[in-house]
Image (cartoon, rainbow, N blue to C red):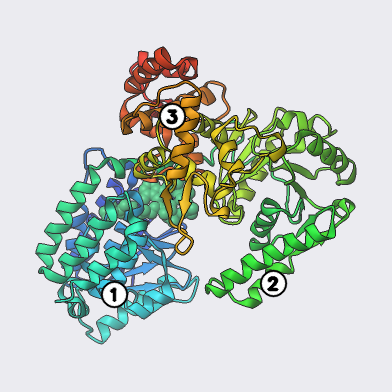
């Protein structure tokens, strides 16, 4: 065994050289790895005793791509292309041995080997599109030559990690090795290639799989059309599609040039900068400075849920999906039956859509038990309360749970903004009380705001963070304050959206600006979807707000076919409503105000900048650990477009000095709702960004 460099070893199994990478955590193609590969291949190729070469990785995975943390910096060491050309041009067979994930540059390296062997648990993919990029090391030209154009389009624009068995079927992998026997299988495979004088297959030379797409531009046109909604706002998907078109219509080397040109364009785009920022933001969110990963955790093998409403049912599904038995407690049988029926309906719909079998539906339903007796929760490890947002009701429930539940059981609340310290104060175990704020639909939305109360213990925090990962959630730890992080900032946007309508803007103007910005839906369309009559009491309504007037006119949103918008009875498409327009005009003129035209830029700034400012206040008050956590909340819980990174990243991209100046301008004309936070003032004064606060 020769150590080529700190992360690369070269050894020999008889006449087969084995190059082993070991660069934790994911053998990313850092300068060290590229140098190691280059020198190791050079040595193995020059060694006359070597008849074949196997490339394998130690640790949890094969190469998971280029080292994203190197992007934006000056390129050091050997170039990836030199390594790839060395491999592909090798006069001796090169076999890539894949375990874990061969992703991005990692798969592109493997595609320069002459053969690939993988264990069944391995997965391969080109997920660069998730970073706002495209495969920039020949992957856009080599993958279609193996999978055909259509499969390559699907893989490169979805970023999917394809299981090894499917890769074998596609020809992306040549042989599967038994789990745990990858190296020996790859070495034997290499030896067989030599013995049988098998050809040194260069993927670049074989474009037979591309023939089917030649002269069929409709393949690309249809693909673009079918995904237009999904790709809206993103730059990278179109660049990936263009590369596959180049693979079909251009010779390999020309296609490579097209790839390099487009790679340069997306790499320098603000969208990719935002998506790369976001990649690390999500991983940072797991790290709690004063709660190290090694902090003890409490086993959670059974969960109780109070309330079988929309939230309770959705929350229960997350645990059943992870194989954790759940007991849902309700007060009335019909409410319980209704809740369990909704859960079964959700599962059956997933089975109908082919996500899993009806057996799986029964298996998951078997893990969800209903009860009308809170005492049935006496032995569970964790209880999550998901009832009506009233403090008195929550305090009553926590008082009872504190008496019923075993010592050491975690008592969590799904409140979306009430004071958790106050809830914890009615228990004798405030250190076991925590907020687990799920987002509706709770079985779908990825975000989980984990709310740390004054007495919540580190064990309970670490347990909750790890449990979030186990049930497939992206968690951020936040502090107790009204609305926590997400809803607190949402209120800023909501306030300004409502105010601008009272000043003359139409709801659909505000929604269009936020939709064009990248949100899936604007606040008024969202209200129509949720129902304008949530919390509205007919007897107490006297036309004091536009919403009152709309509800009094039985315009309660999509469910009544009209709200802020009119909804087409057939297609349910929303269209601006002359009725609402009249209601707003009458309401504004009755208030004595003169409606004015509000420009798109003002609409955007008045909706977004107060959110950024509120995010800064949240950081000032230490209700969030870092700016990127605020961004994780918004991207995962509130539809903030990931190609804009999140409100805090967007503030940095716009320039905090501009945000501050605009806030001050608005404050001068519209009052202290726009008062800049001290942190925003401080960062601008120091010429710093939120990104400098990490
Ligand atoms: N570069 C740098 N660091 C990386 C990395 C990468 N490619 N991938 C992961 N990490 C770090 C991550 O930040 C974390 O660090 C740790 O590894 C574990 O990651 C030329 C241009 C491989 C499926 O997009 O999808 O190749 O927080 O928590 O859940 O065409 O990581 O512990 O300090 O995510 O087990 C293309 C990105 C790059 C794959 C493992 N590749 N990675 O998931 O662990 S662009 C990707 C992943 C490219 C070429 C182009 C996942 C994973 P820390 P983790 P995990």
Give the camera-side residue of 688 and 3: 688
Give the camera-side residue of 346 and 435: 346
Q: Mark 3 points at which residue?
A: 500
Q: Mark 2 points at which residue?
A: 363
Give the camera-side residue of 675 and 318: 675
x, y percent for residue 126: 33, 61
Which of marks 1 and 3 precedes in the sequence? 1
Q: Name the residue under label 1.
A: 147
x, y percent for residue 165: 43, 76
Question: Count of labels shown?
Answer: 3
Gap between marks 3 and 1 measured at Cα: 52 Å
**Disc number placed over residue 521 in the picture, else none:** none
613 in relation to 315, above or below:
above
Does 64 sit left or right of 467 as displayed? Answer: left
Q: How crowded is mark 3: few (under 14 residues within 10 Å), some or many (20 or more)?
A: many
Q: How crowded is mark 2: few (under 14 residues within 10 Å), some or many (20 or more)?
A: some
Does 76 sit left or right of 398 as displayed? Answer: left
Gap between marks 2 and 1 measured at Cα: 36 Å
x, y percent for residue 400: 88, 41
Residue at the spot 77% in from the left edge and 48% down from the top edge: 383
- Of circles 2 and 1, which is in front? 2
Residue at the spot 41% in from the left edge and 31% down from the top edge: 608
């Amino acid at each position: 065994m020769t150590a080529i460099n700190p992360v690369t070893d070269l050894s020999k199994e008889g006449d087969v050289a084995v190059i082993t990478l070991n660069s934790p955590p994911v053998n990313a193609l850092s300068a060290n790895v590229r140098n190691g590969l280059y020198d190791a291949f050079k040595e193995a190729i020059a060694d006359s005793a070597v008849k074949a070469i196997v490339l394998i990785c130690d640790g949890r995975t094969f190469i998971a791509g280029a080292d994203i943390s190197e992007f934006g910096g000056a390129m050091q060491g050997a170039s990836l292309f030199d390594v790839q050309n060395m491999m592909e041009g090798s006069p001796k067979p090169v076999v890539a041995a894949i375990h874990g994930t061969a992703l991005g540059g990692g798969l592109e390296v493997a595609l320069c080997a002459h053969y690939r062997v993988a264990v069944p648990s391995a997965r391969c993919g080109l997920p660069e599109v998730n970073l706002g990029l495209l495969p920039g090391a020949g992957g856009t030209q080599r993958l279609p030559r193996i999978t055909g154009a259509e499969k390559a389009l699907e893989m490169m624009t979805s970023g999917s990690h394809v299981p090894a068995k499917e890769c074998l079927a596609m020809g992306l992998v040549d042989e599967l090795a038994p789990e745990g026997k990858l190296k020996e299988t790859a070495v034997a495979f290499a030896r067989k290639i030599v013995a049988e004088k098998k050809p040194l297959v260069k993927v670049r030379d074989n474009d037979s799989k591309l023939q089917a797409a030649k002269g069929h531009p409709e393949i690309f046109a249809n693909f673009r059309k079918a995904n237009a909604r999904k790709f809206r706002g993103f730059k990278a998907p179109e660049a990936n599609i263009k590369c596959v078109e180049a693979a079909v219509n251009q010779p390999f080397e020309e296609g490579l040039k097209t790839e390099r040109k487009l790679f340069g364009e997306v790499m320098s785009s603000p969208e990719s900068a935002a998506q790369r920022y976001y990649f690390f933001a999500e991983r940072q969110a797991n790290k709690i400075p004063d709660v190290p990963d090694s902090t003890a955790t409490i086993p959670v093998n059974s969960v109780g849920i109070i309330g079988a409403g929309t939230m309770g049912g959705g929350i229960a599904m997350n645990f059943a999906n992870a194989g954790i038995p759940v007991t849902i407690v309700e007060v009335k049988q019909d409410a319980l039956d209704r809740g369990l029926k909704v859960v079964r309906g959700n599962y059956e719909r997933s089975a109908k859509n082919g996500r899993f079998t009806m057996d799986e539906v029964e298996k998951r339903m078997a893990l969800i038990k209903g009860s009308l007796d809170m005492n049935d929760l006496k032995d569970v490890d964790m209880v999550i309360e998901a009832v009506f947002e009233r403090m008195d009701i929550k305090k009553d429930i926590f008082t009872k749970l504190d008496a019923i539940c075993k010592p050491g059981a975690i008592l969590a609340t799904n409140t979306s903004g009430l004071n958790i310290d106050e809830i914890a104060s009615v228990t004798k175990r405030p250190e076991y009380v925590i907020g687990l704020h799920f987002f509706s639909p709770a079985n779908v939305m990825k975000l989980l705001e984990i709310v740390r109360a004054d007495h919540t213990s580190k064990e309970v925090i670490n347990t909750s963070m790890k449990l979030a990962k186990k049930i497939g959630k992206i968690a951020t730890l936040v502090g107790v304050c009204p609305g926590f992080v997400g809803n607190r900032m949402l209120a800023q946007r909501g306030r300004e959206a409502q105010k601008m309508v009272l000043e003359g803007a139409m709801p659909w103007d505000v929604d269009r600006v936020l939709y064009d910005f990248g949100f899936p839906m604007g606040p008024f369309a969202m209200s129509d979807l949720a129902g304008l009559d949530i919390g509205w009491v007919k007897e107490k309504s006297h036309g004091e707000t536009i919403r009152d007037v709309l509800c009094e006119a039985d315009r309660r949103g999509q469910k009544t076919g009209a709200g802020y918008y009119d909804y087409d009875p057939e297609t349910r498409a929303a269209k601006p409503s002359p009725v609402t327009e009249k209601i707003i005009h009458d309401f504004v003129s009755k208030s004595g105000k003169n409606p004015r035209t509000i420009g798109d830029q003002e609409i955007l700034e008045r909706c977004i900048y107060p959110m950024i400012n509120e995010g800064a206040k949240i950081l000032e008050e230490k209700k969030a650990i870092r700016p990127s956590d605020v961004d994780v909340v918004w991207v995962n819980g509130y539809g903030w477009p990931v190609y804009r990174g999140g409100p805090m990243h967007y503030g940095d991209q716009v320039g905090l000095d501009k945000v501050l100046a605009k806030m001050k301008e608005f404050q001068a004309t519209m009052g202290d709702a726009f008062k800049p936070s001290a942190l925003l003032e401080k960062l601008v004064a120091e010429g710093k960004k939120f990104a400098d606060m990490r």
